[in-house]
Image: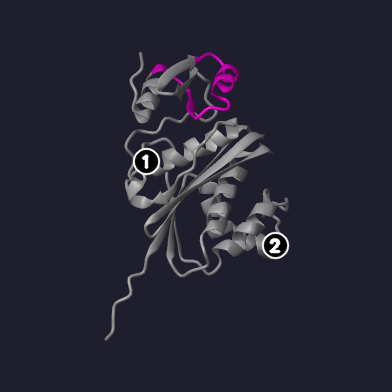
Amino acid sequence: MLHDTIKTMITIFTDGSSLGNPGRGGWGAIVQQENSIQELGGAEPNTTNNRMEMKAIIEALRFIPDVSESVIFYTDSKYTIDGITKWVFSWQKNGWMTKNKTEVLNRDLWEQLVPLVAGKTIQWHHVAGHVGIPGNERVDTIAQGFASGANIQLYNGLSKDYVIDISHVEPQTKKVKSAGAKAFSYISLIDGNIKRYDSWADCEKDVKGKNAKFRKAVSSNHEKEIMKEWGVLGE
C-alpha cells in the first residue's frame, strides 16, 4: 500500500546587531524543525551589523542537518539576501572582485555561506525590522542581548511550549526609520520596568549583564511605539 509523504519545512528567523559599526556585536536565530524549536545566539568583540546578520544565517544553516526539507528564511538583511541570490555568482566568477574592481567585503563569510545554501531549497523572505513580527522581534532581542553582554536564556524544546507565535509574519506596526537618526532618548525594559536615558553610555551601563530589552528612540511618539511593541505602557 502506498502512502503519501508529507514533506516538512524548516522555518528560521535571524538577526544581527552591533553597538557601533564597527563595535561589539551579537547575532540571534530561531530554528523550527518539525515539533521542536532551538534558539541560537553568539557575540563578537569587534564587528559590523552586516557581518552579524550574515553570521546568524550561517550558524542557523550549520545547525540544521543536510536533509531535503525546504527552508523558509525570515531576515531583515536585504544585503545578505541580495548577495547570496544575485551578486555572489559574479563575485566568484570575477575572483571575489566587484564590478568596480574592489575586493568584496566580508568575503570570508560569503565563502562560508555559499556551500551551506548549495543543494538546499530556500525561500528567502525579507522582513522589516521592528514592525511587530514576533519571530523577528525575538531574534533582535537575542542579538542585542549578546552584543551588550546581557544574560540571554535561549529556548530549546517543543514548539507547543514556545511562548512566541512565530507563525505571525505580517507587520503589526508602522516601521520608524531610526538608523542614523539623532537619538531623542534611549529606553530599556528590565524586569518589567521601563527606564529612559539621555545617552547610550548610560543605557549600556544599566543593561549590561542583564536580560533586558533596549532601543534608541528618535521621538516621543517612537518611544510610545517601542513600548507598545514591548507590551508595556509608558509613564
**Which x, y percent locates residue 125?**
43, 52
**Which x, y percent locates residue 5?**
33, 75
- The residue beneath circle 2 is 94
Q: Tell me the distance, in whole angstroms, between the alpha carbons under discs 1 and 2.
A: 38 Å
Circle number at residue 133: 1
Q: Residue furthest left?
A: 1
Judge by depth and name the residue closer to the eye, 114 or 97. 114
Residue type for callout 1? Ile
Please give the name of the residue rendered at 67% of the width and 49% of the height, measured from the top-left corner: 106
**Which x, y percent locates residue 80?**
55, 50
Is residue 198 on the magenta stretch? yes
Query: Please, which colouring scheme is shown?
Result: one colour
From the viewer's perspective, tell me whether residue 105 is left or right of residue 217. right
Please give the name of the residue rendered at 37% of the width and 57% of the height, measured from the top-left corner: 35
Vertical comparison of 39 with 174: above or below: below
Please give the name of the residue rendered at 32% of the width and 37% of the height, measured from the top-left corner: 172
- Which residues are the magenta region? 197-220
Q: Quadrant of the N terminus?
A: bottom left
Assess disc 2: are there few (<14), some (14-19) or many (≥20) residues with their C-alpha within 10 Å of its C-alpha.
Answer: few
Q: Quadrant of the C terminus?
A: top left
- Disc 2 on helix, strand or loop? loop
Q: Is residue 44 visible?
A: yes
